Every structure is written in C-alpha cells, then in structure tokens.
Image (tube, coloured by chain):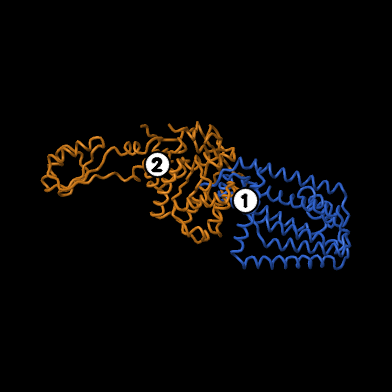
Amino acid sequence: MNLRKYLKVYKKFIHTSLASEFEYKTNILIDLITAILSLIGSIFLLSIFFHNNGYIGGWTFEQALIIQGIYTILNGITNTWFNPNLTEIVKHIREGTLDFVLLKPIDSQFFISFKKINPSGFLEILLGFFLLFFCIRINQINMNLSFLTLSLITISCSICILYSLWFFISTTTIWFVKTWNAIEVLRSFLYIGRFPLNSFSFSLRVFFSIIIPIAFITTIPSEVFLGLSQFWKILLEVIVAIVFLITSRRFWLFALKFYSSASS
Amino acid sequence: MAQNIIDVRNLSKSFDISSKEPGLKGTIKHFFRRQTKSLKVIKDISFEIKAGEIVGFLGANGAGKTTILKMLCGLIYPSEGSILVSGYLPFRRKENFLKNITLIMGQKQQLIWDLPPIESFYLNASIYDLNNVEAKRRIKKLSEMLEIDEELFIPVRKLSLGQRMKSELLAALIHEPNILFLDEPTLGLDINAQRNLRKFLQKYNKETNATICLTSHYMKDITSLCKRVICVHEGAISYDGELDSLLKKLSPVKEILIVCRSEEDAIKLENSGFTVKNKIKNEITLKIKNNSITSSLKTILNNFDIEDLFINEPPIDEVIGKVLIKKDYDI
C-alpha cells in the first residue's frame, strides 16, 4: 500500500467534504446547535436518574459523566465519519454506484469508509473532551503517562469495534439490499452505552458484552479513567477490536464476490 | 497487425433471481419463502477485440450487453469461461489493470453533486497518483477536446445533462485509459450533445488508439462510431462482424423513387420487369438489389425519359430493429 498516495487522497477527501458541507451553511449551524442541545439533554437525563439515588450500578453521578463524555466523543466520531460514509454503502449498492468505487485503483474499503466528513461532528468530539477534562478535575484523577496511554488504547479500540460493527452490517447490503433498520438498531444500542454496564441485569450484561459488545465501547475506557479497570479487561478489548477489524475486512472482500451491480 | 486486447472464451454468467406472485398472498409467500431460480443471462460467448477497435454491442433491453461490459471491466465475476483484458483477469481488479480501463455509464454519475466538476477531477487525479502539474495538463487537454471551459467551475447540480455528461467523461478519462467501456453514454442527451459526444469519442480513439466497447440504443451512436458490432440476443451472440455486412444482409435491396416526364413513361417502366413497390401518377418506386443498382440505373436512364431520381436507404433503426429480435445471422 502506497501510504503517500493514501494520505494525498485523504487530504482531497477532507477538502471536498468540507467544501460540499460549506455549501449549506444553515445545515451546519443546525447540526452544531443539535449537538449542544443533545449533550445538555443527556446530562439532564443522567442527573434525573441519579437524583434520588446517589449510585447506579456502583457508579456516582460524577463517575457516570465520564461515560457520557466518552459516549459524546464516540458519537461525534460516528457523526463525523461513520454516519456520512457507512450509510452511503447501502445507497452505493442499491443504485449501483459502487461500480465507480470498485474500478478505482484504491482500496474500496478505504474509499467508502473515509470519503466524506461531516464537520459538525467535530463540535461533539470537542464537547466530549471538555466533559472528560471536567470529569478528570471533579473526580481528582491523576493524569500520568500510563493513564493517558491506556485511555488512548481503549478509546481507539472502542472506535475500531464500533466501526467494524457498523461496516459489517452495511456490508450485508450486498445480499439483503436494504439494511437501514439494522443500522438504526445498532445506533439505539449505542445509546445504552451511556450508562454503566453494572446498572443492567446479568443477562443484559452478557448480551452487551458478548453478542453486541457495547460494553467494551464505553464502560471499559471509563473504568480506565477511574482506575477501576483490570488488565485482562483492557487486553480483552484490544483482542475484540483486532478480531472485529479483521473480520469486517475479510467479510467485505468475501461479500464483493457476490456483488452483482444494479441493473442499468 | 493489432494485438487482441480483449479475449473472451466460452463465457457464461448465471444470476439467482427471485420471482413473486401478484397480490397480498404472493407478497406474504414471497416474504416467508422466497423462491429463487438460477437464470443463465450470458450463454457461452466467445469473441476477441483488437487494440484500437471501436465495437458496438447491440441487443434488446435485458439481452445481456451491460452484463458483458461489467464482466469485461471486472465488476462481476463470471460463472464459467475465461476473460483476458489487456493481459489481466478483470475480476481480480489489479491496480495496473484498473489504471488501464474506465467505465462510463449514461445513467449513473461519479461527480460530487454539490461541487464544481474540477474538484472531482483533482480527486480522481490523486486516486490515479497524478501530480498536480500533470493533472492540470490533462484537464486542459481533455476540456479543449470536449469543448468545456466555464462549466468546470459551476456546481454539478447546476449543469445541464449534456454538460454533466462531458464532465463525467473528463473525470473518467483523466488517467488516460487504453480501454473505454461505455454503457449508453448518450442516454437522455439532446441531438447536439449526442453529436458532440460522438465527435469526441472518434477524436479520442484516433489520437490515443484507445479500444472502445460501447452499448447504445441510439443507432446513430453505433453507425457513426462502430465498424464492428456484436449482436447479443438472450445472452448469446447472434452476430459478430462488420456493421456494413450486417446492414447489407438485413436489407439487400434499395428503394429508388423515379419521377418520369409523363405518366405513359411510368406505365412503360412499371411493365419493364423491375420489382415495383408503388406507383402514383408519374412517380414510381422500384426495389432493386444492392448488387445490381448500377446496371439497373444504366438501363432505366438509357430507355426511359426520367425527370428526377432518388435512392433511399432503408431506415437504419428499422434494419437494426430486426437484429434485436432475431436469433442468428450467419454471414
């Protein structure tokens, strides 16, 4: 793989995406307002849950805010990269425009995963980081090198798991043509990731750890923030992320053999 | 002698197609127990194409022309048989193979809708690993050939269909491919836009010696661009050869309208042994075989008092229309 070429192409992707989005200024403004209101709404909802009882699943409100911060960052990443690109896969396959992607001398997964960027998601990422820094202060977390490294590793793994899950579902469009609902279900599960895993019943905890690993996405990075995480959990998240990434890649290459292109 | 750039041997393709009975009952049945059957859409076809050739694929809707093009450019895996394009197995989609080909579809677009075409050109240039200087040179050259200038800086959504198609062509040719696959490139264009596009393709083929495989339902595209046609009927090749030979085979006679000086001359001509299509007063229409036109005209001009004379070719659409419904043409 020619890294220089891919960086050059990615620079062009950023340029064309921003230029396209800036054609519609009002839309960006609405997206930015929505991001702020959505975060305020989520914190308000969380405060209601904690109003009568100081603890949920062993977590205080201040600790649960860390999960909210990580969720906001991930949601921002989802809105910046995953949503504009991965929902387009369904459109590409239904309308047959995937043909143009497959005939370009560039990795098709790279092309369809990174072609678009929605700049309004950047604000969410920024807000998420602000919230995290706020939580670090109120929870009196010691920011040392190992803390930063582990946080970076676990958040990166969360991004990989989320991307792989989404990409995997989108790929099934090659056979099922329409998979909007499955993607909506995934997004709904992601909302659940705003709450500590311990606050759910045992069966749900198993479901969100093994079947759809939402737990890995927000809870484990939050535990790292609070110094509660055990080494095996972090290792497990890394393994899950690698397995998911490789599987989604292989599944894409396998699915392309069944691509029949839309009729003209 | 030009080398074969495309070599297709015993190629077949089957698709699993599901069918549904009409009505609510049929819909429910279709939802729970989908019945699929394997349909062979391309049946054991073989042909080769030489470098620099322009070949037209003719056939009715659903005959399999687009499926053949998509297999040639590597989008669809063949079920049986072999394809070699420029020495590559297309479905492996190797980088060097993809740099050699392009696919242009009249009904689908790759340009970024909200941005001027120039942005898409530079994006494609980076994908094909061209530096900015080279990309600029190619954009300039192609835009001159396509006669587009200001349109390059106007958002695609505000361009006319003709301007958009020209921009699509530029985007698809920026890497200077050797082989062009064109699937109904003139679809929906007005007469002038169609003519300009044909003119461009002729020029491009002449200047670069690129091979062009084309499907179109506009007969003018085929007759003005393609010397050779491959007729596809229900997934099989019904004719592969020169377009002229096909036309001669399909319409072996020409119609000649003769205006005589008097009605008596017309009656005399009517009874002289020629095949008469019709006669109105002093005007008579004869059907004469292509191979005896010269001798017949000599006889008529020497023996009858003729005021005027018109030779009519049968309408090309009518002639080609026969190809779309017939299974075999042995020439």
Q: Nearer the viewer, residue B219 or B275?
A: B219
Q: Label 2 sits on what residue type?
A: Cys
Say which residue appears at 48% left-offset and 41% top-offset: B64
Toward the front, the furthest residue is: B133
Point out which mark residue B226 bears.
2
Q: In the image, is residue B202 above or below residue A196?
A: above
Is residue B312 shown left or right of residue A237? left
State the hue of chain A. blue
- Name the quarter where the N terminus of chain B is drawn: top left
Is residue A137 shown left or right of residue A100? right
Residue named by callout 1: A89
- Label 2: state its secondary structure: loop
Q: Chain of mark 1?
A: A
Say which residue appears at 25% left-offset and 37% top-offset: B289
Q: Label 1 sits on what residue type?
A: Ile
Q: Quadrant of residue A20?
A: bottom right
Residue A182 screen position, x and y as percent: 68, 52
State the hue of chain B. orange
Mark 1 is surrounded, within 10 Å at the Cα level, by few (under 14), some (14 to 19) or many (20 or more) other residues, namely many
